[in-house]
Amino acid sequence: MRDNILDKRFEGKAVRIYLIGSKEPLEGVVDEVSKYEVGVRTPSGPAVVFRHSIAYIEVSQVEIHGFSSEELEDVIITPEMTGSEVTVVLQDSTKIVGKLSKVSKYEIGVRAGDRALIIPKSSISHIIFQEL
């Protein structure tokens, strides 16, 4: 079982991290990933982002390919729901409309138009499914 979608496989990949309470994203290349932190090389210098401060992460469409198949316990949203059309409402009332593409213990992956987003479950208020 994967705890996070954003893991070591993203090292060396370009990301745009939207932080809670900030309008401007942090852009850079993932340098290092741990359970609670993400190291990013930015034009301003290296930065360490704490996962609890992330609203969502924008990644390349190809980075969220295929479907989840991990076994998850004690959750309602399971990999079997991938492919569902959803509206994800964040804690700050931001709405993200798209297709559920990946599910892990602490994050979901959503394709929203031409963007692929990794959203920490801790940033989500609720998710509305369009007919399962």
Image (cartoon, helix red, strand yellow):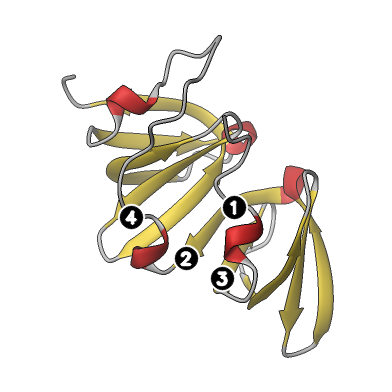
Question: Which numbered dot is residue 59?
Answer: 2
Element at label 4 = loop
Q: Residue at x 38, y 59 (%)?
A: 116
Name the N-terminal-most of marks 4 and 2.
2
First of labels 1, 2 by sequence position: 1
Q: Which residue is mark 4?
A: 65
Q: What label sits on residue 6 in the rendered view? A: 1
- Contact between marks 3 and 1 (CB within 8 A): the answer is yes
- Classify mark 3: residues with Cα within 10 Å, few (<14), some (14-19) or many (20+): many
* Vertical position of residue 38 compared to residue 25: above or below: above
The front one of 70 and 55 is: 70
> Is 21 on the left-hand or right-hand side of 119?
right
Q: Amino acid at mark 3?
A: Val
Q: Are marks 1 and 4 in contact (CB under 8 Å)?
A: no
Instruction: Mark 1: give few (<14), some (14-19) or many (20+) Cα within 10 Å.
Output: many
Tell me the residue at 58%/60% (across/down): 9
Which residue sits furthest left?
A: 131
* Disc 1/disc 4 C-alpha distance (Å): 13 Å
Disc 1 vs disc 2: Cβ atoms closer than 8 Å? Answer: yes
Confirm whether residue 60 shows in the render.
yes
Q: Residue reaching furthest top?
A: 74
Q: Is residue 91 visible?
A: no
| Res 87 → quadrant | top left
What residue does disc 3 label?
A: 15
Residue type at numbered disc 2: Val
Q: Earlier in the sequence, mark 4 or mark 3?
A: 3
Say if mark 4 contacts mark 3, CB within 8 Å. no
